Image (cartoon, rainbow, N blue to C red):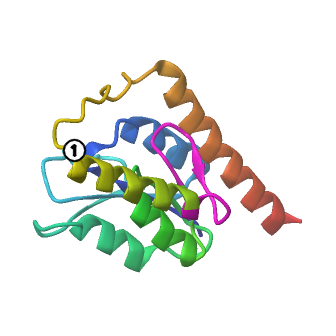
């Protein structure tokens, strides 16, 4: 049975993911280092990991298996879960794949090097969250689950 894991500390689509989990009757695991209110939904589990760098990421990477879906904005975590055979998507609905994760890791590392080399580099901030991002995450997760269960039920 599939599980949806969410790197929950900064995830803006926890509510939408809970709706998807409820609709498809699958488990949703929110992984955080604290500060998140537990859900009364019996399908939703809140896992609190110890404080420390990437502790939530380590937990998710250790738990996610083929058939699971991981929602994260963390590219290295996405790479790990894809290597484990799980699916990964961003909070905005973009899907990480084995074909695109290498380029995304390289771009992330390049940008980190550029920022380190020029601390005065002026960058535009993150784009504000748009309502269509929430629709994309709901649609993308639902489509993955439909494809998975269509294969199982054939």
The residue sitting at the front extreme is 117
- Viewer-proximal residue among 36 and 81: 81
Which secondary structure is most common in the magenta stretch?
A: loop
Work out which quarter of the rendered image holds the N terminus and state it: bottom right
Residue 142 vertical position relative to residue 136 in the rendered view, above or below = below
Q: Is residue 27 left or right of residue 68?
A: left
Q: Which of 125 and 65 is in front in this view?
A: 125
Q: Mark 1 points at which residue?
A: 118
Residue at image location 33% in from the left, 43% down from the top: 11
What stretch of residues is rendered in magenta?
89-102
Secondary structure under the numbered disc 1 in the rendered image: loop
Q: How many labels does the image show?
A: 1
Give the residue at x 12% y 68%.
Answer: 52
Vertical order, 41 against 13 (above or below): below
> On the rendered structure, is 54 left or right of 140?
left
Residue sitting nearer the eye, 19 or 32: 32
- Residue beneath the point at 23% across and 51% down: 117
Give the quadrant of residue 138: top right
């Amino acid at each position: 049975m599939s599980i949806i894991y969410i790197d929950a500390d900064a995830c803006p689509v926890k509510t939408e993911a809970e709706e998807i989990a409820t609709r498809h009757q699958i488990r949703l695991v929110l992984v955080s280092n604290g500060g998140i209110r537990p859900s009364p939904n019996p399908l939703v589990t809140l896992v609190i990991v110890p404080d420390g760098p990437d502790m939530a990421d380590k937990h998710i990477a250790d738990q996610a298996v083929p058939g699971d879906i991981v929602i994260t904005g963390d590219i290295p975590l996405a790479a790990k879960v894809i290597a484990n055979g799980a699916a990964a998507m961003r909070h905005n609905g973009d899907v990480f794949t084995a074909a695109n994760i290498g380029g995304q890791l390289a771009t992330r590392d390049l940008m980190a090097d550029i920022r380190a080399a020029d601390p005065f580099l002026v960058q535009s901030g993150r784009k504000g969250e748009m309502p269509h991002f929430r629709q994309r995450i709901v649609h993308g997760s639902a489509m993955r689950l439909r494809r998975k269960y269509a294969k199982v039920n054939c």
